[in-house]
């Protein structure tokens, strides 16, 4: 009978990384609660407000590949530490802008400062969790996305209702400075340098990582070759379409929810948290089932397709408020569960040397969809004075992303060995 592997890394690495990116994600999407105040205070249209929400992702592109490379070759810990300080500065400055030009510049620089943190953290996790555990490790870390929204939505609604949109950005820009100190003293780049894990856990990881390295074709371990890998570029295009749908929906969700329910900002904040509670449950179920079965492709594609269907149904049922809100909840609930499984795919096509730049490439170019989604929704709202055309566009993007994944060959890994799994 196999001896259970110690769980120390699950309890140490995941929570610290989780809270770090929870803060990052809050500072990224809270702009959705500022749109109304920004439009009135700075005298801008919904189109320009959407541009402010989306321009973040042009800045976000700059450090994706360099960030992944630095994390893989040098230190993910140090890269993320300095990023925490930088994005805290620009998050606070967002609340101090006086015109639309300053707003666009600061949002762009916020994107630059957060760029590279996602691939750097994925590199960190790839050094602590073998491939058979990776969907669950990614999923537990990526719980930060819905949790950030659950925390941010009611909190942001209250700040905007009782203070102003400027205080929204100032108050939510303080936590990165506090967490930078915690990050520095608690995170290690790999099991080889960590003092907090046992010899048994370190030996287990050495054995599992040796198996993972042996399963990757040597040619795929050259990071330059990964840029000519058709499967990598298919993932880039898929992620681009997903981000159009995801950020186009998420950044405008407070506006859509307020329009459908005709409530104030405090109530809208509470209602906006519900879709992310649904996402938490389905993320857990999808990633755990994927690790148990070893199946990756359908566990990535089907949530996107179901999320797109729920989204268009929400747009078609606006006259029945309960149904429309229910479908808005299911949209986010289905749309997010793909993500933990999606990031198990790149390590199956490229080796360790290529993984950092490959993840940066996918995340960087793919996240440009985060610019086009909010901007196009804002433009369509301005042109039609309604949300339907924007939601239809997002539905098409999500459906296309899900269907495109089926162009990959069936992707399967050995099912996780339950007796030695750290967390079930």
Image (tube, grey):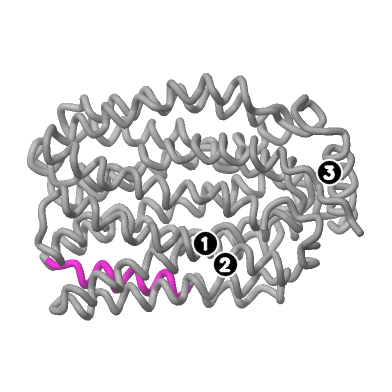
Asked if residue 394 lies in the magenta stretch, the reply is: yes
Task: Please indicate, yes or no, whether residue 378 appears anywhere in the rendered image.
Answer: yes
Report whether 264 appears left or right of 368: left
* Contact flag, marks 1 and 2 (Cβ < 8 Å): yes
Residue at image location 53% in from the left, 64% down from the top? 338
Residue at image location 67% in from the left, 36% down from the top? 69
Under tag 2, what secondary structure? Answer: helix
Q: Which of marks 1 and 3 is nearer the N terminus?
A: 3
Residue 305 vs residue 125, the one in the foreground = 125
Q: How many labels does the image show?
A: 3
Asked if residue 268 lies in the magenta stretch, the reply is: no
Residue 240 vs residue 118, the one in the foreground = 118
Q: Mark 1 points at which residue?
A: 283
Instruction: Tell me the CA gap for discs 3 and 2.
Output: 25 Å
Instruction: Tell me the CA gap for discs 1 and 2.
Output: 5 Å
Q: Earlier in the sequence, mark 3 or mark 2?
A: 3
Dot 3: within a 10 Å radius of its alpha carbon, few (fewer than 14), some, or many (20 or more) residues? some
As drawn, the label of residue 205 is 3
* Contact flag, marks 3 and 2 (Cβ < 8 Å): no
Quadrant location of the N terminus in the rendered image: bottom right
Residue 399 position within the rendered picture, expressed as x and y whole percent measured from the top left? 44, 75
Q: Name the residue under label 2.
A: 286
Residue 223 vs residue 392, the one in the foreground = 392
| Magenta segment boundaries in residue numbering | 386-400
Residue 115 position within the rendered picture, expressed as x and y whole percent measured from the top left? 50, 37
């Amino acid at each position: 009978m196999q001896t259970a592997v110690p769980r120390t890394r699950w309890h140490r690495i995941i929570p610290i990384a989780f809270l770090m990116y929870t803060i990052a994600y809050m500072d990224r999407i809270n702009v959705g609660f500022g749109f109304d105040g920004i439009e009135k205070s700075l005298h801008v249209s919904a189109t320009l407000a959407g541009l402010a929400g989306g321009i973040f992702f042009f800045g976000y592109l700059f450090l994706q590949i360099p960030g992944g490379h630095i994390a893989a070759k040098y230190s993910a810990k140090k890269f993320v530490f300095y990023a925490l300080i930088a994005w805290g500065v620009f998050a606070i400055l967002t609340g101090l802008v006086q015109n639309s030009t300053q707003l666009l510049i600061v949002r762009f620089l916020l994107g630059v400062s957060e760029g590279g943190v996602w691939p750097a953290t994925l590199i960190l996790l790839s050094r602590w969790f073998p491939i058979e555990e990776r969907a669950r490790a990614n999923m537990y870390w990526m719980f930060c996305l819905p949790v950030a929204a659950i925390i941010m939505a009611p909190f942001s609604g209250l700040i905007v209702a009782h203070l102003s949109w400027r205080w929204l950005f100032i108050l939510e820009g303080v936590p990165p400075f506090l967490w930078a100190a915690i990050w520095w003293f608690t995170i290690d780049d790999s099991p080889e340098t960590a003092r907090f894990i046992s010899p048994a856990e370190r030996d287990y990881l050495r054995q599992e990582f040796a198996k993972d390295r042996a399963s990757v074709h040597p040619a795929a371990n050259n990071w330059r070759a990964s840029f000519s890998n058709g499967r990598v570029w298919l993932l880039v295009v898929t992620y681009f379409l997903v981000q159009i749908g995801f950020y186009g929906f998420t950044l405008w969700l407070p506006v859509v929810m307020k329009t459908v329910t005709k409530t104030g900002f405090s109530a809208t904040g509470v209602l906006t948290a519900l879709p992310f509670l649904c996402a938490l449950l389905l993320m857990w179920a999808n990633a755990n089932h994927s690790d148990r079965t070893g199946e990756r492709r359908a566990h990535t594609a089907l949530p996107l397709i179901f999320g797109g269907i729920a989204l268009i149904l929400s747009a078609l049922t606006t006259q029945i408020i309960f149904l429309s809100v229910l479908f808005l909840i299911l949209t986010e609930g289905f749309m997010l569960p793909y993500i933990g499984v999606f990031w198990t795919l790149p390590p199956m096509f490229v080796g360790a040397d290529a993984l950092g730049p490959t993840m940066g490439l996918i995340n960087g170019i793919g996240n440009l969809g985060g610019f086009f989604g909010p901007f196009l929704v804002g433009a369509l709202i301005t042109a039609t004075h309604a949300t339907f055309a924007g939601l239809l566009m997002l539905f098409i993007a999500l459906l296309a992303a899900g269907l495109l994944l089926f162009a990959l060959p069936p992707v399967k890994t050995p099912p996780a060995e339950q007796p030695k799994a750290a967390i079930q």
